[in-house]
Image: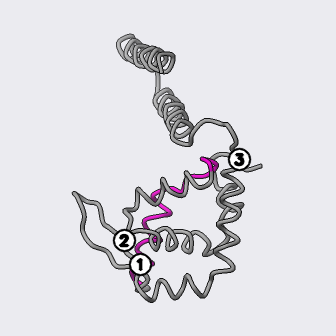
């Protein structure tokens, strides 16, 4: 039903302004950091889509500039986002649209069925991408090839043991 990754999934899940409502909704549930928002969205669509930090963080900045959220410093560089009364008013005024978006997200999560958890899919795709990017940079020396092979074999053994 829904593919994994890429802009095609963004178009299916979120029309213009939809992601902003979803982020605001998640913050209304409880104050959150940007990374928590990314993971919450990914979980709620069963891993079928994970918004990039390049999408989420500018949206959080916009919500702050619009006065829909406040931001307080957290641990390290983390910033905690909390909904404002104005932000809650925006959610309340867009309830039918938000409910439709949340229903689509729940449908995507249900379609995942008994598939692997989103965190496993994310890690698998991350490893695959890291390997492709490293190999694209040029030939590996014998030492580098041995290190990559050892890392892949260690990961394989760890997965088999799990």
Give the CA separation, mark 3 to mark 2: 30 Å
Which residues, given as a range, are shown in magenta?
46-65
Q: Label 2: how many residues lie within 10 Å, few (<14), some (14-19) or many (20+)?
A: many
Q: Quickly name the residue at label 3.
A: 3
Q: Residue at x 63, y 81 (%)?
A: 95
Give the CA separation, mark 3 to mark 1: 31 Å
Q: Are marks 1 and 2 in contact (CB under 8 Å)?
A: yes
Q: Quickly name the residue at label 2.
A: 81
State the image coordinates of residue 107 (x, y, percent, origin top left).
Answer: 72, 56
Left/right placement of residue 131 relative to residue 74 reads right
Q: Label 1: how many residues lie within 10 Å, few (<14), some (14-19) or many (20+)?
A: many
Q: Are marks 3 and 1 in contact (CB under 8 Å)?
A: no
Q: State the residue in front, 8 or 111.
A: 111
Quarter of the view holding residue 143: top left
Q: Residue at x 55, y 51 (%)?
A: 43
Give the CA separation, mark 1 to mark 2: 7 Å
State the image coordinates of residue 9 (x, y, percent, origin top left).
Answer: 67, 55
Quarter of the view holding residue 151: top left
Please give the label number shown on residue 50: none
Q: Is residue 84 magenta?
A: no
State the image coordinates of residue 158 (x, y, percent, origin top left).
Answer: 44, 19
Q: Quickly name the residue at label 1.
A: 83
Q: Is residue 39 above or below residue 124?
A: below
> Which sits earlier in the primary sequence, circle 3 or circle 2?
3
Q: State the residue in front, 139 or 38.
A: 38
């Amino acid at each position: 039903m829904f593919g994994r990754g890429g802009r095609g999934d963004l178009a299916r899940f979120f029309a213009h302004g939809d992601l902003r409502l979803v982020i605001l909704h998640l913050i209304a549930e409880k104050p959150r950091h940007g990374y928590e928002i990314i993971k919450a969205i990914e979980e709620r669509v069963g891993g079928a889509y994970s918004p990039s930090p390049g999408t989420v963080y500018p949206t959080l900045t916009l919500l702050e500039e619009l006065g829909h959220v406040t931001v307080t410093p957290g641990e390290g560089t983390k910033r905690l986002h909390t909904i404002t009364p104005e932000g809650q008013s925006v959610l309340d005024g867009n309830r039918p649209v938000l409910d439709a978006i949340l229903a689509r997200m729940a449908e995507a999560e249900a379609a995942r069925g008994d598939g692997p958890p989103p965190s496993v899919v994310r890690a698998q795709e991350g490893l695959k991408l890291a390997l492709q990017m490293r190999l694209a940079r040029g030939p590996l020396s014998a030492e580098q090839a041995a290190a990559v092979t050892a890392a892949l074999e260690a990961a394989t053994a760890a997965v088999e043991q799990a």
